[in-house]
Image: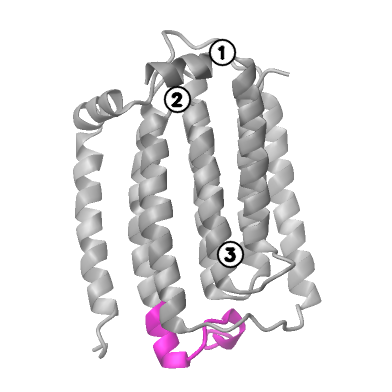
Amino acid sequence: MHVELHHYLTVSILLFCLGLLGVILRRNLLVIYMSLELMLNAANLALVSFSWFNHRLDGQVLVFFIITVAAAEVAVGLALIVALYRKRQSAHVEDLTSMKL
Amino acid sequence: MEAINNAINSGAATDVLFYVFAVLTLLCGLLVIVNPFSRSPVTSAMFLVLTIISMSGLFVLLHAFFLAAVQIIVYAGAVMVLFVFVIMLLDLKEEQRRKIKLFGFVAGLISVGGIFSAFVTSLATVQALPEAPGPRAEGDTQSLGHLLFTNYTLPFEIVSVLLLVAMIGVILLSKKKLE
């Protein structure tokens, strides 16, 4: 079977759902963050495959921006996690309940 | 570049390579989330590196050569080093197995299943793609850079400001005393 657009999109969908599952099921803040990266990568794969099969480069430019923003986001998020760990001595989401009613 | 192009255009080999990279990506992605052998964040980080590398293989199959290189340099290089560094800094122990709340577990599975089915139904409409005009667009550095500095100059400049803001924010956040 020749590989077409929907093959790539299927991989992207499965990877996105894996990332979402990780965000919901795991309890460690850092692993949740890695799952978020997985979801961003799934979106990148969908954009690149659309751009190849539509004979345009705009999707790839968007992926370039997504990678840049993701790098900035990771830097800020990890700094937040480190600051949180200093205050609470825990990177476990169930220990962070100050917003619970 | 020519040699890679010829190898990619030969057809059957790329199909096999697609399946290899796709299975590798999904398998390593699964091992990031649920690893039966280890609950340590370090193994998750290492499998995320493998996921990213095999995904850059998929990018090469889609002729996105520049993005494949950037993916490895920025993600597998910079971002994952940051992750591993923070894991070292926090000195995290193995994630304790706590009782998973049944309600949260079921609700999570239902929401993931809902999003998955929404994606699959939209995939069925995508399949009939009309033949796009023009030649295939190669994602090499020259054409991508040309596009970046003609059509997308303003977003490019805004992203540079965003990086500056993120840098200042990180420095502020990681100061010992938060005023």
Chain ID, mark 2: B
Secondary element at image label 2: loop
**Residue A45 picture location, percent across and down:** 52, 38
Secondary element at image label 3: helix
Q: Which amino acid type is marked by label 3?
A: Ser
Q: Quadrant of the N terminus of chain B?
A: top left
Between residue A79 and residue B154, name the one nearer to us.
A79
Secondary element at image label 1: loop
Magenta region: which residues? A81-101
Q: Which residue is mark 1?
A: B10
Q: Are marks 2 and 3 in contact (CB under 8 Å)?
A: no
Q: Are marks 3 and 1 in contact (CB under 8 Å)?
A: no
Q: Which amino acid type is marked by label 1?
A: Ser
As drawn, the label of residue B44 is 3
Between residue A34 and residue A61, name the one nearer to us.
A34
Q: Which amino acid type is marked by label 2?
A: His
**Residue B31 picture location, percent across and down:** 66, 58
Alpha-carbon neighbours of circle 2 within 10 Å: few (<14), some, or many (≥20)? many
Q: CA distance from mark 3 to mark 1?
A: 36 Å
Confirm whether residue B4 shows in the render: yes
